[in-house]
Image (cartoon, rainbow, N blue to C red):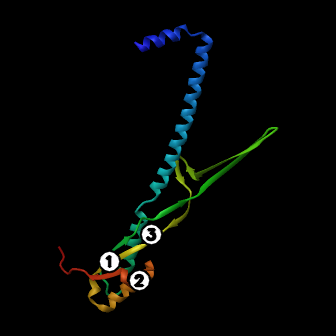
Amino acid sequence: MKIKEMLKTLAETPAKKKIQYLIMILIVAIILLLYFSTLTSGNEKKEVVEELQTEQNIEDIEQKLKTILSKVEGAGEVDVVINYESSAELVPAMSEQNNVSSNQSDNSSSETTNESKDIATIKEGSDVSALIIKEIQPVVRGVIIVAEGAGDIGVRLQLLEAVQTFLDVSAEKVEVLKMNDTKS
């Protein structure tokens, strides 16, 4: 019933008023469109940074350590597990824009400052990625090394010292264990 009343009122409204209402609706629609487009572009940039934070770097470190420790004389086959307190943190470059506008009238003056920070991105073809200026490595919580030759105290000490040097951790955070002799 109310819809019929609104349509009747709209039909009775002069053409000039209809155009004014239409213009107001278009302005509001454009403002909303601009607002929501800036929200989604900000979210897309955040997603780009989150995608860059992968576990691949941690796995690479474990693999390098495993490779180098297996080359120690008497170590034999070696497995390595590194436990971190958190994941690596990538720090993106930020682009900043500062706009200052001032208005002066007879009795008063005002100054408006607009600051905006965005993540700087690099576009290579169709790929967009964040410009990373620094990578903060996670803190090592502990390391477990399982080696065939860890039964020999000399080999065990060499493996321990190598891990301490490679990861810059104390001996309390490293455990060197003898690998099980049974092959399944």
Which tag, 2 or 1, sits closer to the chain's start? 1
Q: Are marks 3 and 1 in contact (CB under 8 Å)?
A: no
Quadrant location of the C terminus? bottom left
**From mark 2 to mark 1, how far is it between C-alphas?**
13 Å
Which tag, 3 or 1, sits closer to the chain's start? 3
Closer mark to the observer between disc 3 and disc 1? 3
Q: Amino acid at mark 2?
A: Ser
Mark 2: few/some/many CA within 10 Å (<14, 14-19, 20+): some
Q: Nearer the viewer, residue 43 or 113?
A: 113
Q: Nearer the viewer, residue 114 or 73?
A: 114
Residue at 49% in and 9% down: 8
77 relative to 181 in the view: left or right: right
Helix, strand or loop status at disc 3: loop
Give the tally of numbered discs.
3
Helix, strand or loop status at disc 2: loop
User: Residue 156 appears at what percent x and percent y?
Assistant: 32, 87
**From mark 3 to mark 1, how far is it between C-alphas?**
17 Å
The residue where tag 3 is placed is 138
The residue where tag 2 is placed is 170
Q: Nearer the viewer, residue 60 or 134?
A: 134
Q: Amino acid at mark 1?
A: Ile
Q: Amino acid at mark 3?
A: Pro
The residue where tag 1 is placed is 144
